[in-house]
Image: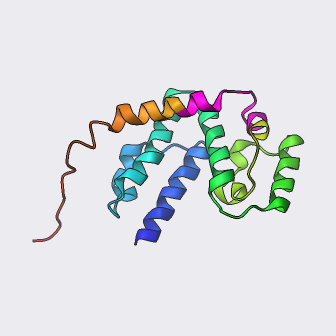
Amino acid sequence: MEIRIELARLAYAENILRCTNEPPEMVEDLLSLDGELEKARRWFVFAEAKRRFDPNVVRGLLVYLFSHYASSEFDPHKREQLVREITEGRVRMRDLTIERLAGTRLSWEHVFRLVGRQFNPTREKEKIKELYNQLYASASLIPRTEVSYGH
């Protein structure tokens, strides 16, 4: 079951990337069925950041994140093909998937091209961290109510 929940979290993350937003409250229980609420919250904060901040910038951060960390193996052929498509304007963020980005290790220059403008990645990451703290700092102090389906 844990693997299925992790896949559900990745599917939710891909939905954030591809611009189809399910509100976090609609999927919170599903994405934390394995007890890993913290992992689910990381994606929820990206979804909320997309609503509050420039959605394309948040998606750009996700493009960078997935291209560098979704796979531990670098794939130079895959990178070359994707960079060519980005440079020629044949691919947009809505066309990208985690699978397509994994192992490509895109540069910020390529992410900026996808977003359509430059932005300060460090500042944007800090805004998302601050949002996470706003949303969940007090939640970690409140014990989560256990739900029992036993009789």
Side of 7 relative to 115 (left or right) = left
Q: Residue at x 35, y 35 (%)?
A: 135
Is 118 magenta? The answer is yes
Q: Which residue is at the front of the view, 133 or 14? A: 133
Q: Quadrant of residue 30?
A: bottom left
Q: Which residue is at the front of the view, 126 or 25? A: 126
Relative to 132, residue 54 above or below: above
Q: How far across and down, in percent of the image, does residue 68 sit? A: 67, 52
Q: Quadrant of residue 24?
A: top left
Side of 76 relative to 53 (left or right) = right
For the question of whether residue 27 can be seen, the reply is no
Q: Residue at x 44, y 44 (%)?
A: 44
Q: Residue at x 35, y 53 (%)?
A: 37
Q: How far across and down, in percent of the image, does residue 98 sit? A: 64, 56
Q: Residue at x 55, y 34 (%)?
A: 125
For the question of whether residue 74 can be seen, the reply is yes
Main secondary-structure element of the magenta-colored stretch: helix
Q: Which residues, given as a range, are shown in magenta?
A: 111-125
Side of 130 relative to 56 (left or right) = left
Q: How far across and down, in percent of the image, does residue 94 sit? A: 68, 45
Q: Extreme left residue here?
A: 151
User: Quadrant where the C terminus lies?
Assistant: bottom left
Is 27 magenta? The answer is no
Relative to 39, residue 129 above or below: above
Say how the picture is coloured.
rainbow
Relative to 33, residue 57 above or below: above
